[in-house]
Image: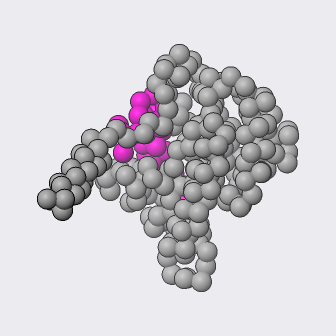
Amino acid sequence: MLKKSLLWIAASVLVATTTYLIVRPKKSYALTDDVMGATSLFVLGDSQTKRHLGEAYKEVFDNLDVSYFGKEGATHEDYIKDESLLDNLQCADILVIQLGDNGIPNKESSVVNFITKVKERCPKSMIFWGGPMKPVEPTVRSNYVSMTDPSSFKYLPNYIEMRRTWDTRLSEWLQKLGVVYVSNIDLQESQPTDAAFSDSRGGDGIHLDQPSALDLANLMYKVIFKSEQEVL
């Protein structure tokens, strides 16, 4: 009798757990109530922002006053070391930091220092951070990704794993700082292969082209104003 009771309890727990896993809501990246009153957005970043992503944000977030600044090859540490570079930061209701493609060293204090400086300048801004892009096979001639040299860190499988490490570091560190982290790697992998921003996106393997930048900006709009469930 005791054996049957234990089996019944175990089965009930299994059913309850399975049901929860099926119906539980996905975690939202942002609380809609916090951003509904926003009227302005600023993007601070690197070459991704400077080339196509900044303009993509202006096109997609056309209900907001959008501006941006991007510097080729920039990292968050560059913005710390050069205060004049950080002077390009413009306070807005929503700040999007698009940094990570040029490396995230295993130095949590530098990310803390960077966010501290940003918050000191813009204490009322809601901060989102978009991480490094997932490398893909280039569709044009490119020196950014190697498809033939396994000894190179730019060899596609090696490069993807390296950037996953950067992605994980940012995710873990920023969670402690009250910053909403958005994994561009996760976003890209969740998209159908025929989407502009997907594992089959075009370009040099690292930098977004205009279609993929627009696609990512649209995804970020949903992340900021809606929920992860509507994105993934």
Residue in the picture at 81% in, 34% down: 87
Residue drawn where x is 85% and y is 40% of the image? 83
Q: Is residue 69 left or right of residue 1?
A: right
In the image, residue 23 lies in the stretch drawn in magenta? no
User: Is any atom of residue 15 visible in this view?
Assistant: no
In this rendering, is residue 39 above or below 221?
above
Q: Residue at x 56, y 43 (%)?
A: 181
Q: Main secondary structure of the magenta part?
A: helix
Query: What colouring method underlies this structural image?
Result: one colour
Say whether residue 94 is left or right of residue 87: left
Seen from the viewer's position, the closer of residues 71 and 172 is 172
Q: Which residues are magenta?
A: 205-232
Q: Quadrant of residue 27?
A: top left
Task: Let me know if residue 206 is in the magenta part.
Answer: yes
Asked whether 177 or 111 is in front, the reply is 177
Residue 58 lies in quadrant: top right
| Rendered-image quadrant of the N terminus | bottom left
For image coordinates 27% across by 41% down, the residue present is: 23
